[in-house]
Image (cartoon, rainbow, N blue to C red):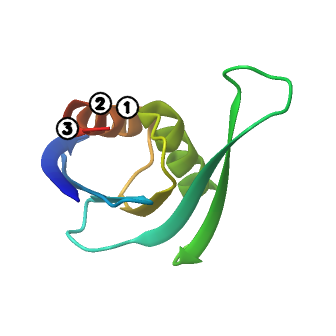
Amino acid sequence: MKNHACAVITHGHHTDIAIKVYSNRILLIITHFKKLGTLIAVNRGRLFHQHNNNIYSTKVLFGRDDDEVLAAVRYIAEQINAEKPLLISISLKDYDPDTLKAIVKAINDIKSW
């Protein structure tokens, strides 16, 4: 199991990011509030007869079932390109595209897969 953590400033907000890599899944915690947020399972699939065309299914396990949160999680999953299923806890003050881009950059800088 591998652990990685970092913090970035996004739109003036301190953002904590933690990654825990398990044998069958990756746990990703992203928060502005120093606590867990909405917990979402993300699985990647492929479309038949399509190359490099991934689809991401999301399922809210706990917390806020909101289109904005689900879109943010799907965007992060697409950009970090993890081979394993993801379990993402996310709790942000804003879901602005620039905030999400900064978070993705930080994750890509510290990931080990």
CB under 8 Å between discs 1 and 3: no
- The quadrant of the picture occupied by the N terminus is bottom left
In the picture as drawn, the residue positioned furthest to the top comes out as 51
Q: Which residue is mark 2?
A: 105
Q: Label 1: which residue? A: 101
| Dot in front, 2 or 3 | 3
Q: Identify the secondary structure beneath mark 2.
A: helix
Please tell me how crowded label 3 is: few (under 14), some (14-19), or many (20+) other residues with Cα within 10 Å. some
Q: Is residue 110 visible?
A: yes
Residue 65: tell me if it is visible. no
The quadrant where residue 25 appears: bottom left
* Label placed on residue 1: none
Q: Is residue 54 positioned above or below 77 on the image?
A: above
- Mark 3 residue element: helix
Q: Residue at x 44, y 60 (%)?
A: 24
Q: Amino acid at mark 3?
A: Ile
Q: Earlier in the sequence, mark 1 or mark 3?
A: 1
Q: CA distance from mark 1 to mark 3?
A: 15 Å
**How busy is the neighbourhood of tag 2: few (under 14 within 10 Å), some, or many (20 plus)?**
some
Q: Amino acid at mark 1?
A: Lys
> Mark 1 or mark 3, which is nearer to you?
3
How far is mark 2 from mark 3, CA to CA?
9 Å
**Residue 110 numbered tag:** 3
Q: Is residue 63 left or right of residue 93?
A: right
Q: Is residue 73 left or right of residue 60?
A: left
Which residue sits furthest front?
A: 23
> What x and y, as percent, mark residue 31?
28, 61
Q: Residues within 10 Å of mark 1 (few under 14, many from 20)?
A: some
Give the residue at x 15% y 52%: 5
Amino acid at the residue labelled 2: Lys
| Residue drawn where x is 54% and y is 57% of the image | 69
